[in-house]
Image (spheres, rainbow, N blue to C red):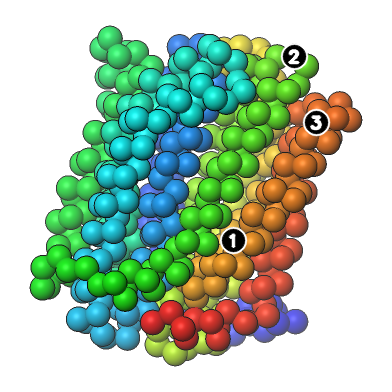
Amino acid sequence: MKLIKIINDKKIKEVVSESWSVSWPMTIIMFFEFLIGITDVYIAGKFGKEVQAAYGLAFQLYFVFIIAGMALTVGTASVLSRLFTSNRKSEFSLAVSTSIITAIIAGLVATFLGIFFSKSIIHHLRTPQVVKDLAAPLLMIYSLGFIFDYVLMNTNAVLRACDMIKKSLFAMTVACILNIALNFILAFGTSMGYKGIGAATVISLFAGVILNFGFTRKFITKGFNFSTLMFKKMLDISWPAALLQIFWQLGTIALFLILNMLPAMNIEIMAAFTNGLKIESAIFLPAFAFNMANAVLVGNALGKKENNQAFKKGIITAITGVFIAIILTLIVVLNARIIAPFLSRDSVVINETLRYIFIALLFEPVMAWGVILGGGLNGAGDTKVVMAIVVGSVWLVRIPLSYLLGVYFGFGTQGIWWSMNISIAFQCLLMTRRYFSKRWMQLSEQVV
């Protein structure tokens, strides 16, 4: 009944328009991210299934290293979105400079750790030796760009929070085009080979940072200053998001290790999983775009003390995102037999990729609903509950079920893919329950 009342609200067109104005640029940005990922997988596939599997492993570890930066953007967007609409200009400027300084320092730490420890981390994983040997140098190159990724993510969050999302879109468009072009040039036109994938990423991230610095410079009215108070406010929101990302990425790596426990075709299955994740990102990334847009919309409304509007905006944004997820899911599933062979020439990899698409993508609209509502909760600063829900769904449901169904009971990849769907349903149910409880409205008052 509550949902029907929200949909029938007279001001629904205004809310949908506002939601879409923030969401569509983010959706395009995420589409660019998808294009880069698909290009990476396509090029890796040209060098063989072993390189494709190695790329998948290196890319998951890449995300482990940039988790702190991703988490910082959650705190940045949550705090700045409310300061921006509350017209507290001096505090807003101080918060912007604090967030950028924090991103630079954290990025330097991640770069240092990646350069000196990435090879050791990879060689301690229980994966085929050939995959380890190929993944290590790729992750080493990626490590050089961690600092740029941290700053780019942070400045994008600043631009989202202050209604300059189109500036972020411009920077990411340039970075995407550069990344894709350099992918082909460096991988096929130089002696770098598949390692050109990593070099292209580093160079394009640097270009995006330069553009975003130009856009965000105007908000730093009194020079770069660091506020311990602002840092603590952002950190209080960010650390649960960081733990969420850590356990999420470790969960994906755990799935790679579980796939390695299957009795046969381990490398082919790992390559198919890599391909499946990239294809799935065509739906997940737009949903994540709505997640970030929802955080800003809910945060802006709460900053103006419009709690009821914040609730409605979150629901309408989620409905819009689910509608888009349904369309994208249908497009991918109906064209699966064209997409899978495009990414690999190996028949086993192709067939397993198709199985992943036909099973794992069935729950994408469900995933979108839970992810987008989670974005609204993040905007309210309710990141601890979001963390508990997501971590619980991965480590109490997905990973144990994947091992039991896939390995112990012998259902293979079908059991693992269905375990992923069950965990998504569990996560969505709990996220919906939390959002409709409205308890996050009281918590939001403590953020700024």
Which residue matches tag 2? 264
Residue at disc 1, secondary structure? helix
Please identify the quadrant where the C terminus is shown. Answer: bottom left
Left or right, 197 with reference to 349: left
Amino acid type, label 2: Ala
Amino acid type, label 1: Met
> In this rendering, does residue 335 appear at all?
no
Left or right, 4 with reference to 90: right
For the residues marked 1 and 3, what is the alpha-carbon distance in whole angstroms? 26 Å
Q: Around disc 1, counting alpha carbons within 10 Å, would you say few (fewer than 14), some (14 to 19), or many (20 or more)?
A: many
For the residues marked 3 and 2, what is the alpha-carbon distance in whole angstroms? 12 Å
Identify which residue is drawn at 55% across, 21% down. 53
Please identify the quadrant where the N terminus is shown. Answer: bottom right
Q: Which mark is residue 142?
A: none
Which residue matches tag 1? 387
Position of residue 67 relative to residue 131, above or below, is below
